[in-house]
Image (cartoon, rainbow, N blue to C red):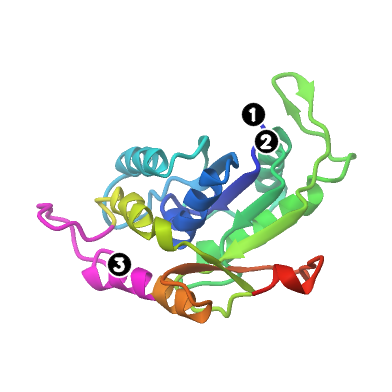
Amino acid sequence: MKLDLLFIAAHPDDVELCCGGTILKHIQLGKKVGILDITRGELGTRGTAETRDSEAKKAGNILGIHWRGNLGFRDGFFVNDEYHRIKIIEKIREFTPEIIIANAYQDRHPDHGRASELVYDACFLAGLPKIETIIQGAVQQAYRPSLLLHFIQDNYIKPDFLIDITPYQEKKMEAIRAYQTQFYTPGLATDEPETYISNPNFLQAIVARSQEFGKAIGATYAEGFLCKKLLGVNSFYQLK
């Protein structure tokens, strides 16, 4: 399967929290969208790797994505080395996405910034023919996506551009709530400890961030993105 957009994130739920609305919007536009989770989030205080797997599948179904995979790297301990880069290169070459969207440059959770650097390096290296990767006995062709973007997470970073997600905000929140073990779920009985992200204020902050970004472009809700390279447009009329 060829994907138009591939979101690569450190943990299941990173993508839903930061750009679920953008995913819904692009699927509505007819784009094929996939999510590649780097770890299973097994170090999370609440839930287990198995419950996180189930929740990620449910969230993906709500979003209507075309593919989701997990590399199974060690949560909290994966590094930006040859082994980890090669595994991501294999997926880039397999799905040949035009655009890849990865974690923020830096964030409260150290895995986020490390994943950002790992994906940045893998995207470049995937285009080098002398790096050989083999899938199911066949040598993969070198391929580099035309654009690498980064979503904004817990720490505020001024976005380079914003996408209006107003019609998709409620469905985005539904996908986030699929992670019942991670976030505040009214009526769910649990003996697990409260964490930074299980407090109801956390989800309220997610909504507030979308409102803040929306206000900046005259919309109700929006999501922000970053790009390390300068972005070009064909005319002033592509800007608003």
Secondary structure state at the residue bearing disc 1:
loop
At horizontal 46% and vertical 57% (from top left) the residue drawn is 21
Secondary structure state at the residue bearing disc 3:
helix
Question: What stretch of residues is rendered in magenta?
Answer: 183-208
Disc 3 target residue: 203
Q: Is residue 6 magenta?
A: no
Disc 2 target residue: 95
Quadrant assignment, res 104: bottom right
Badge 3: residue crowd in 10 Å (few <14, some 14–19, many ≥20)? some
Q: In the displayed structure, would residue 49 be above or below residue 110? A: above
At horizontal 39% and vertical 38% (from top left) the residue drawn is 61
In the picture, the quarter occupied by the C terminus is: bottom right
Badge 2: residue crowd in 10 Å (few <14, some 14–19, many ≥20)? some
Dominant SS type (magenta): loop
Q: In the displayed structure, would residue 182 be above or below residue 214? A: above
Disc 1 target residue: 1
Separation of residues labelled 1 and 2 (CA atoms): 6 Å
Judge left or right: residue 93 versus residue 193. right
At horizontal 22% and vertical 68% (from top left) the residue drawn is 200
Q: Are marks 3 and 1 in contact (CB under 8 Å)?
A: no
Quadrant assignment, res 211: bottom left
Q: Considering only order in the chain, which callout, 1 or 3, is on the residue closer to the N terminus?
A: 1
In the picture, the quarter occupied by the N terminus is: top right
At horizontal 82% and vertical 65% (from top left) the residue drawn is 234
Q: Which mark is residue 116?
A: none
Q: Are marks 1 and 2 in contact (CB under 8 Å)?
A: yes
Picture coordinates of residue 128, whole percent (x, y): 87, 45
